[in-house]
Image (spheres, rainbow, N blue to C red):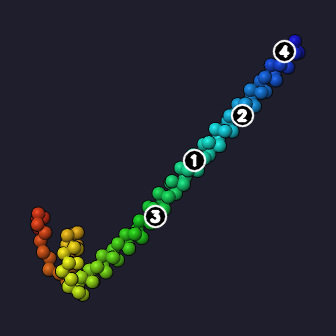
Amino acid sequence: MTGRRSGWIAWSGISFAGLSLLLVVVNVALAVVNARTQAEVTARQQFIADGPQYNQIGEALVHSLNAAATATNDGALIAMMQRHGLNPSGAAAAPTPGRRTR
């Protein structure tokens, strides 16, 4: 009777060791997936945090284009700005075809 019990206990121990090993492998896999996801979230947060700075750069670029168009009275630059919905401060506001004014 003790031989049967000791055999059963030994197989139970081996089963629990195998289950523990399987859980360790699953834990490592989940840690790798979590680290990858955290890296993606961090990159997205950085992109969102940099948004206002990019907006300021864009505004500065538009202001410098406006100053250049006003100073040089460059027709091509003024036409390009008007095509994109920008009216240089020194240029006469020409109505764009297809758009209504109030």
Extreme residue in the right direction: 2
Foreground mark, 4 or 3? 4
Instruction: List x then y, in percent, for residue 34.
Output: 57, 47
Q: Amino acid at mark 2?
A: Ser
Marks 1/2: CA distance? 21 Å
Marks 4/1: CA distance? 45 Å
**In the image shown, does 92 or 69 lie closer to the viewer?**
69
SS for dot 1 = helix
Mark 2 and mark 3 lie on one chain; the one further toward the N terminus is: 2
Mark 4 and mark 2 lie on one chain; the one further toward the N terminus is: 4
Marks 4/2: CA distance? 24 Å
**What residue sits right under mark 4 in the picture?**
4
SS for dot 2 = helix
- Looking at the image, residue 22 sits to the left or right of residue 33; the answer is right
SS for dot 3 = helix
- Looking at the image, residue 6 sits to the left or right of residue 78; the answer is right
**What residue sits right under mark 2 in the picture?**
20
- Looking at the image, residue 17 sits to the left or right of residue 35; the answer is right
**What residue sits right under mark 1 in the picture?**
34
Determine the residue positioned at 84% across, 17% down. 5
- Disc 3 crowd, CA 10 A, few/some/many (<14, 14-19, 20+): few
